[in-house]
């Protein structure tokens, strides 16, 4: 296990460097920069523009700027946001908690419903419930998240049952502890439903296909031949083997913290990492974009590593040598 971890951590280094360099290159090739709009303002003198370019290193060659940024990252410094004029680390940290809460609740919602429903439709293959739930799953996968977000906001506006967007109410800071918790939960219901619906549909179809594939395997027929009940066969033998792909998916979901909720956060005005990244790209805030890309890359790689470790723990057929080759 020690060699496996060391090998995977070493392999992460060139991946992180390659991804961040390509991102830095793409951002640098975009016409203009953060100061382009300021240059059009006649009230700002060219001298002030040159001072700001020197302050943020925008007057230096691309490789020099990237290497300086990479050196600061090695010292746990992600730089300063050009738009917000604050540390990128503190800015990402202040928004991360909202995205983590949203993504964790959406994941809990989708997984809690998808796995039992997938088991039911697989056990009752070709039944009425199988057809109805499979139709709903395909419908959920086909509806874009942003459209469903607009639809839910329309429902909230017409009914008044839920707040129309936002992370919390205007008077949130004046509320006591439990009213704050209730306010946050009330603002999370619709975003969690929007994010969890598409994920739940895909997970349900995956669970159904996994059980249908495994329930006729040789070791399952052997378990039935021993006289075990169908319930024991499904839940003890089939389900345990069917969950292996979900272990891998759980690890990859860490990388979705930045990208998965971006459109929903933008539509519903949720103050999270996705909306922050979109604003940074629009404003060409290169250091904020690079910090967000770095965090997303690390989350994805760490999630993949944790998924491999969990897969070895739950499946005795998989060892560290085979997990490291995935």
Image (cartoon, grey):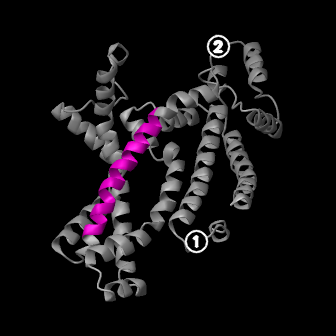
> How far apart in space, not on screen, are marks 1 and 2 (Cα)?
66 Å
Crowding at label 1, few (<14), some or many (≥20) Cα neighbours within 10 Å? some
Q: Position of residue 293 (x, y in %)?
A: 62, 42
Q: Position of residue 222 (x, y in %)?
A: 38, 87
98 or 242: nearer the viewer: 242
* Residue 10 visible in this rendered orientation of the protein: yes
What span is colored magenta in the figure? Answer: 98-120
134 w.r.t. 148: above or below = below
Residue at disc 2, secondary structure: loop
Residue 116 among those drawn in magenta: yes
Instruction: State the residue at coordinates (38%, 75%).
Output: 237
Q: Which mark is residue 274?
A: none
Q: Earlier in the sequence, mark 1 or mark 2?
A: 2
Give the residue pinned by disc 2. 42
User: Which quadrant holds residue 309?
Assistant: bottom right
Give the residue pinned by disc 1. 318
118 w.r.t. 234: above or below = above
Nearer the viewer's eye, disc 1 or disc 2? 1
User: Which quadrant holds residue 42?
Assistant: top right
20 w.r.t. 198: above or below = above
**Rendered-image quadrant of the N terminus:** bottom right
Q: Position of residue 107 (x, y in %)?
A: 39, 49
């Amino acid at each position: 296990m020690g060699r496996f971890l060391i090998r995977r951590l070493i392999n992460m280094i060139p991946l992180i460097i390659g991804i961040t360099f390509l991102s830095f290159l793409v951002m640098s090739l975009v016409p203009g920069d953060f100061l382009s709009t300021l240059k059009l303002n006649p009230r700002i003198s060219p001298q002030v523009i040159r001072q700001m370019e020197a302050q943020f290193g925008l007057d230096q060659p691309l490789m020099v700027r990237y290497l300086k940024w990479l050196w600061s990252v090695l010292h746990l410094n992600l730089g300063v946001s050009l738009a917000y004029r604050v540390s990128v680390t503190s800015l990402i940290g202040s928004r991360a908690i909202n995205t983590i809460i949203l993504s964790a609740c959406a994941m809990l919602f989708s997984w809690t419903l998808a796995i039992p429903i997938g088991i039911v439709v697989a056990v009752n293959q070709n039944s009425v419930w199988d057809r109805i739930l499979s139709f709903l799953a395909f419908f959920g996968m086909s509806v874009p998240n942003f459209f469903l977000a607009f639809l839910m906001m329309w429902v909230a506006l017409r009914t008044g049952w839920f707040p129309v967007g936002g992370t919390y109410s205007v008077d949130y800071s004046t509320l006591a502890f439990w009213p704050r918790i209730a306010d946050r939960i009330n603002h999370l219901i619709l975003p969690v439903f929007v994010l969890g619906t598409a994920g739940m549909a895909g997970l349900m179809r995956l669970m159904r296909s996994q059980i249908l594939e495994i329930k006729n395997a040789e070791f399952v027929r052997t378990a039935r031949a021993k006289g075990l009940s169908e319930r024991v066969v499904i839940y003890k033998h089939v389900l345990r083997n069917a969950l292996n792909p979900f272990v891998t998916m759980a690890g990859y979901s860490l990388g979705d913290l930045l990208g998965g909720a971006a459109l929903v956060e933008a539509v519903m005005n949720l103050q999270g990492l996705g909306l922050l990244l979109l604003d940074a790209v629009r404003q060409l805030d290169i250091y904020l974009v690079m910090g967000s890309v770095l965090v997303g890359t690390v989350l994805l790689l760490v999630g993949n590593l944790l998924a491999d470790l969990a897969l070895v723990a739950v499946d005795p057929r998989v060892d560290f040598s085979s997990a490291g080759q995935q």
